[in-house]
Amino acid sequence: MIRKIHFENYNAIGYRKMGIILRNNGCFLNHKTVLKLMNLMNIHGKVRKSKYKSYKGTIGKIVPNIVERDFVANKPYKKLTTDVTEFPNIRYV
């Protein structure tokens, strides 16, 4: 019955859907039993290709290093920088 259902559905269903179809036809089997029987008969469902890819390439633009660690300027407001030091969580008592 499993082989017949498999070929009727274009060799494309796995053990979960196979178990549902078997139950609808009156054959009540545990999903693990259906999986074991399908493995014994070398019947597998088609594996779908993953559609979602989270990689989006380089996002934003890379800013050129204009300052080059030279923080001395000859005029005020010529070079504006900030401190990006990260402090760990310290408890003061």
Image (tube, rainbow, N blue to C red):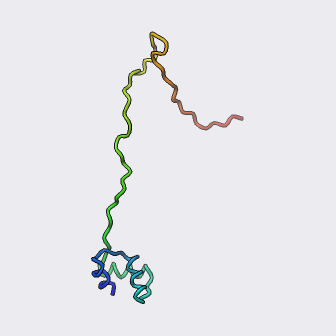
Q: The N terminus is located in which quarter? A: bottom left
Q: Is residue 59 above or below residue 24?
A: above
Instruction: Identify the residue at horizontal 32%, vertical 73% (top origin).
Output: 45
Instruction: Identify the residue at horizontal 34%, vertical 80% (top origin).
Output: 38
Q: Residue furthest top?
A: 74
Q: Position of residue 13 (x, y in %)?
A: 34, 75
Instruction: Identify the residue at horizontal 44%, vertical 87% (top origin).
Output: 28
* Left or right: 78 as drawn, with respect to 87: left
Q: Residue furthest right?
A: 93
Q: Position of residue 88 (x, y in %)?
A: 58, 36
Report the front residue among 64 and 35.
64
Q: Toward which corner of the image does residue 19 lie, by quadrant?
A: bottom left
Instruction: Identify the residue at horizontal 38%, vertical 77% (top origin).
Output: 15
* Left or right: 19 as drawn, with respect to 4: right
Report the front residue among 43 and 93.
43
Q: The C terminus is located in which quarter? A: top right
Report the front residue among 29 and 21.
21
Q: Residue furthest bottom?
A: 26
